[in-house]
Amino acid sequence: MIISYRSMMEKTGKSLDMAQSENFDQIFAQELSMEELDQALLELESFVKLDKPAEVILEGASFLKKPEYSSFSEEERENLCIKAVERQLGAQERQLLKNWLKEDKSLQTTFKLYKNTRLQKDFSVVFAGKQKLKKTSWQENMYPWLTRFLAAACFVLFVLAFWNPNEPMQTQTIALAQDLTTTEPLRIAQENDVEQTPKQMGRKNIVPIKKVQTLASPVDAFASTPAQALQIVKAEEPLTETLLAQSTREEKGSFEGLDKDNNLKKTEKITLDFSNEKEGAKSFFKLLSLSISGKKKQSLARHEH
Amino acid sequence: MTLKEYNQCVDLHANNIFRFLVKQIRDKDTAKDLVQDAFERLWLNLNEVSFEKGKSFLYTVAYRRMLDILRKKREHYLEERPDFDHPDQWRDYNNLKDIMDKALETLPLQQKSLVLLRDYEDYAYKDIAEITGLSESQVKVYLFRARKALKDYLVKINFKEA
């Protein structure tokens, strides 16, 4: 425009001051005739046409554009796939992933692999004992009682398991005496049994004894119950009678025992009180029980006094 | 929970818990014992556990008992795990289910349990956290790691979907 204007001004031989040069429209209107204006316009149009740059088009320029997903790292893209498999995608993320999958083939492959990581239930594995697991109303009602009973039984077993046989002899004797009325099975040990007792019981303080002299016959006998043991005692008529006939009404039996280390055999004494038949039987039963389970030497000594 | 609901729990969940356990310990007898244990515990706590919480209770008991057993058998268990660094051995497996079963074996026990709970039972992260004693975010992270490991495994064996 400026060039065209200058060329026109040269043609007309006119020059412009600063104020005029700032307002071309006014100059054109004032200084040029209609013909000149038309000519200037034609020149101007031809100038514009000539100087118009030729249209240059870069074929496939879109490849320079970066896809939307490229602004995300590979890890971020994979995380989106995992989120999809985990069904944790929001609506916006879902749309984003959809767009990415359209554009990115490698992401499609990755996404398929992730989809495969979702396990399918294996219906071939079936639990066979379902019916056994089911409960009936009877079980429901009985269960509290059953559990209580079992708890009590467990308690009794626990007490028996940890029952300390090193209790004082007197206590033991009373219990055995009371047991005479019961039918609880009882086995009187043989001599060999007595020898094995310390190993079986594994308790340091237990010193088994066995009768070796005075009452050889009854101790070697066997009884299945305390009552039977009492009968055995009674059956030994000569012995019982002899004992009862004695004025002291006492008999000292001689027993062989082991010390605490199970090494040394030692003779111990025990008093049999046959002041009456029942008491005699009790005392004798003590002896039997001693030969069964074995007692502490100290307990034995205490009883002797 | 009532007796009827308890029996309903047996119907609904016994198979699923059994499947969940078998997939992890690969020993049906032990899995069976664990299922029985879990239901016995539920029976003992019948009054304390609601029907809605029954499933979660059963899975929690079974999962924790299973961990105890696996800890005891740990060495044995690890020895039995096949060598997954050699994908050649999977050429025979052209079935996705088989492959995924094997791929599952490559995961650490915890991740394996999470994937199974998630996929088999469709549990939410929160429920899985409750069963496994993990936090919700831990569950999420471990599951993401597990998925990645499973996918890497599929890449490793050059798995192509039929």
Image (spheres, coloured by chain):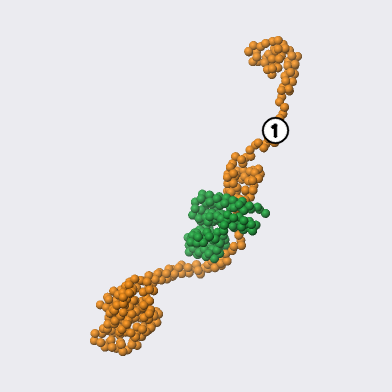
Q: Residue furthest top?
A: A13
Is residue A246 visible in the rendered image? The answer is yes
Quadrant location of residue A92? top right
The number of numbered badges drawn on the structure is 1
Question: SS at mark 1?
Answer: loop
Left or right placement of residue B32 versus residue B97 in this view: left
Q: Residue furthest bottom?
A: A238
Name the image quarter holding the C terminus of chain A.
bottom left
Left or right placement of residue B117 versus residue A102 in this view: left
Q: Residue A241, image x and y in percent? A: 29, 88
Name the image quarter holding the N terminus of chain A.
top right
Quadrant location of residue A294? bottom left
Q: Which residue is mark 1?
A: A58
At 64% across and 47% down in the image, what residue appears? A108
The one of A124 and B16 positioned closer to us in this rendering: A124
Q: Residue A152, image x and y in percent? A: 41, 70
At 41% across and 71% down in the image, what residue appears? A157
Is residue A119 visible in the rendered image? The answer is no
At 52% across and 63% down in the image, what residue appears? B34
Q: Residues within 10 Å of mark 1 (few under 14, many from 20)?
A: few
Left or right placement of residue A15 versus residue A296 in this view: right
Q: Residue furthest left?
A: A247
Q: Chain of mark 1?
A: A
Chain B, colour shown: green
Q: Is residue B162 above or below residue A137?
A: above
The letter of the orange chain is A
